[in-house]
Amino acid sequence: METLARAACHGGVQSFHSHVSNSTGTAMRFGVFVPPGNGPFPVLWCLAGLTCTEETFAIKAGAQRLAAELGLMLVTPDTSPRGDGVADDPAWDMGQAASFYLDATAEPWAAHYQMRTWLIDELPGLIGAQFPADMARQGITGHSMGGQGALTLALKHPDRFKSVSAFAPIVAPTQVPWGRKALPAYLGDDPEAWASHDACALIDGGARLAELLVDQGEADAFLAEQLQPERLEAACTSAGIPLTLRRHAGYDHGYWFVQSFVADHLRWHATRLTA
């Protein structure tokens, strides 16, 4: 592991790192905020959205002050593999910075886009070995595409994540343009594979969460076409999953929105990870 940057922050330490991933075959970057104290600390994974990096949530969300008070470690993974020889797309919603947090099976993506394996099987071992992390207490949150990743990873690994939340998530990518473009490209012509990265489809298929917090801005330009939280609301109601879905007038899709409600999410996770 190479440390790229390190700085004191609210009594703790914010750092950024790189390591050579066996999963992706590339150097992968991630950020870690370690709160003050000796630990071990519960870990909250924070997945960013399309066009973002490992720095986006760490720099823009303003989460460290309260995370320091609550004793939460924050991990911010990059949103895709990167570098020379890594497949990309000229559009901003495919390729590098747009992995959808899945393991690709179709070419040219399969060689490096193994994000689920990196996030679930590889990176947690590194975090547990290199930082004062309590890996028995993990939660996950995300924004937009990162919200999609948080929901689907939690639904597929319910024993791993004890708390789940999302900001403006893509809840049904098989039904909206972003997902209808990305999922066939990454996974080929297999609707069952697409559904395994769709939170609503997973819930309809029997996957369950104990409870869920979602915030959505009503002035979000992507709300009607891409996000459609009413689909998640219907799926959770049908499945009996307790969903706290909060709609906020005047808020858009960006990090001013995330900043405005991140404290509620941190407290949500801290309550469930420190009980």
Image (spheres, helix red, strand yellow):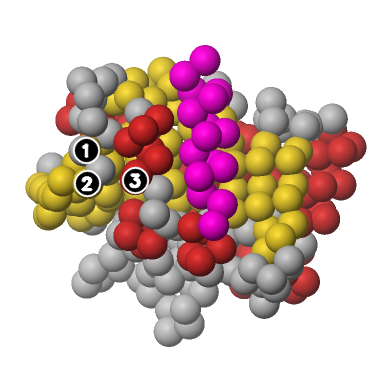
For the point 27% across and 34% down, which residue is it?
35
Few, some or many residues within 10 Å of mark 3 (<14, 14–19, 20+) = many
Secondary structure under the numbered disc 3 in the rendered image: helix
| Residue on which disc 3 sits | 64
Residue 16, percent from left and from top: 20, 51
For the point 20% across and 20% down, which residue is it?
38
Please state if 112 lies on the left or on the right of 268 as rendered: left
Q: Which stretch appears magenta? A: 260-275
For the point 23% across and 31% down, which residue is it?
36
Type of amino acid under label 2: Cys
Q: CA distance from mark 2 to mark 1?
A: 5 Å
Do callouts 3 and 2 mark residues in contact (Cβ within 8 Å)?
A: yes
Residue 253, percent from left and from top: 59, 69
| Residue on which disc 2 sits | 9
Q: CA distance from mark 3 to mark 2?
A: 7 Å
Say which label, 1 or 3, has the lower sequence index: 1
Q: Is residue 172 magenta?
A: no
Secondary structure under the numbered disc 1 in the rendered image: strand
Q: Is residue 264 magenta?
A: yes
